[in-house]
Amino acid sequence: MARRFLARHPDAIGLDLGAGLDSRALRIAPPPTAEWHDVDFPEVIAARRRLLPEAARPHDLAADVTDPAWPPARSPSTATARSPCGPRSGSPSARTSPASPGSPASTTPASPNAGTPS
């Protein structure tokens, strides 16, 4: 489903919430015009960085999506032009939220102008 959505919306932003050790970005090969974000707890993102090749994790984002304060508010100093989540996770100003037990698991490709994927 994500591959078909990205084919129809090559400028989309894909979010894999509760990504775990999923290597979906490697398998679906999003076009270079798309952004792919794998979101999970900080401990899981740390494991992804140790275990998965960089191509399988283009934008890792350590966050607790069950926290009511997530996603963090954007500010000019932390947000990028396209990313709703701020800078790439490997950058010095990347944001993280405290971890808590449990992790939601869903993959939601998103595009601000595309409407709901079918």
Image (cartoon, rainbow, N blue to C red):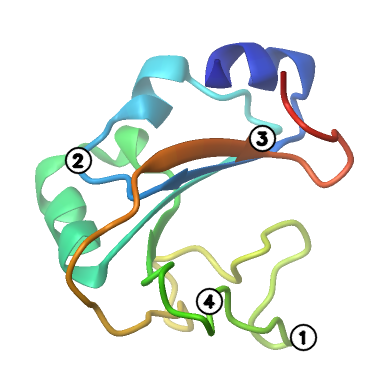
Q: How many marks?
A: 4
Q: Which mark is residue 96?
A: none
Among the two numbered marks 3 and 4 on one chain, the one whose residue lies closer to the N terminus:
3
Quarter-of-image position of residue 43: bottom left
As measured in the structure, the alpha-carbon distance from the residue carrying label 2 to the one carrying label 1 is: 31 Å
Q: Look at the image and tell me in which quarter the N terminus lies.
A: top right
Q: Which structural element holds mark 4?
A: loop
Q: Is residue 20 left or right of residue 37?
A: left
As measured in the structure, the alpha-carbon distance from the residue carrying label 2 to the one carrying label 3 is: 21 Å
As measured in the structure, the alpha-carbon distance from the residue carrying label 2 to the one carrying label 4 is: 21 Å
As measured in the structure, the alpha-carbon distance from the residue carrying label 1 to the one carrying label 3 is: 22 Å
Q: Which structural element holds mark 1?
A: loop
Instruction: From the image, tell me which residue sits under label 3.
Output: 34
Q: Amino acid at mark 4?
A: Trp
Instruction: From the image, tell me which residue sits under label 2.
Output: 21
Among the two numbered marks 1 and 3 on one chain, the one whose residue lies closer to the N terminus:
3
Q: Amino acid at mark 2?
A: Leu
